[in-house]
Image: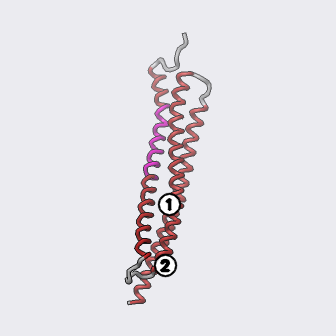
Amino acid sequence: MMQLPFQSLPSALTILSSMITPALLITAAGAFIFSTSSRLGRVVDRVRAIADKLDELMCPKPAVKLVEERKAMLVGQLAQLSKRADILQRSLTVFYMASGAFIASSVAIGVEAVLGSTLTWIPVALGLLGACFLFYGSVMLIFEARLAVSALRSETGFLHRLVSHEKTEC
């Protein structure tokens, strides 16, 4: 009669502990997914706010200063927000892939324990793949954050010019 590798409690606990390890990494991937989704939501909100401002500038009130410069700044920001949204969408995809790789790794550990095969490299490869996805997604978020700061610098630069313009008119 074939004996399964997890018939004793200590060996079963070892297998379960091994299967839980990828779950911790799934939690990390989930945190990235949540924060990246929030960032994407802020980009969408900002695009909508800029669209509203552009609508107002199309039929400006007499008191609005530097209308053409405002339009140019807002259109430039829309381009940067579009790039940010693309990066965030790709990051989300990569974080979902990381989560899937960690889940597959956990399942592969369980299957390996049940079947007792010699394919122990599969769970390790899946875990490494998931870790690589997390790393790549993190690097993409660094680029997205740099774009966000660049857009902020552009907007604050315009606001400085606007304030300077108002000082010269007063």
Residue at x-position 55% and y-position 49%: 135
> Callout 1: helix, strand or loop?
helix
On the image, the x and y values in percent for residue 166 come to: 40, 85
Q: Which residue is mark 1?
A: 145
Prevalent SS, magenta region: helix
> What is the quadrant of the C terminus in the image?
bottom left
Crowding at dot 2, Cα within 10 Å, few <14 / some 14-19 / many 20+, comes out as: few
For marks 1 and 2, give the CA distance: 25 Å
On the image, the x and y values in percent for residue 15 come to: 49, 27
Amino acid type at mark 2: Glu
- Say if 75 sits above or below 137 in the image: below
Q: Nearer the viewer, residue 9 or 108?
A: 108
Residue at x-position 42% and y-position 82%: 65
In the image, the segment drawn in magenta is 18-36
Q: Which residue is mark 2?
A: 69
How many marks overall? 2
Residue at x-position 49% and y-position 31%: 19
Please say whether residue 27 is one of the residues in the magenta stretch: yes
- Say if 75 sits above or below 98 in the image: below
> Callout 2: helix, strand or loop?
helix
- Say if 141 sits above or below 101 in the image: below
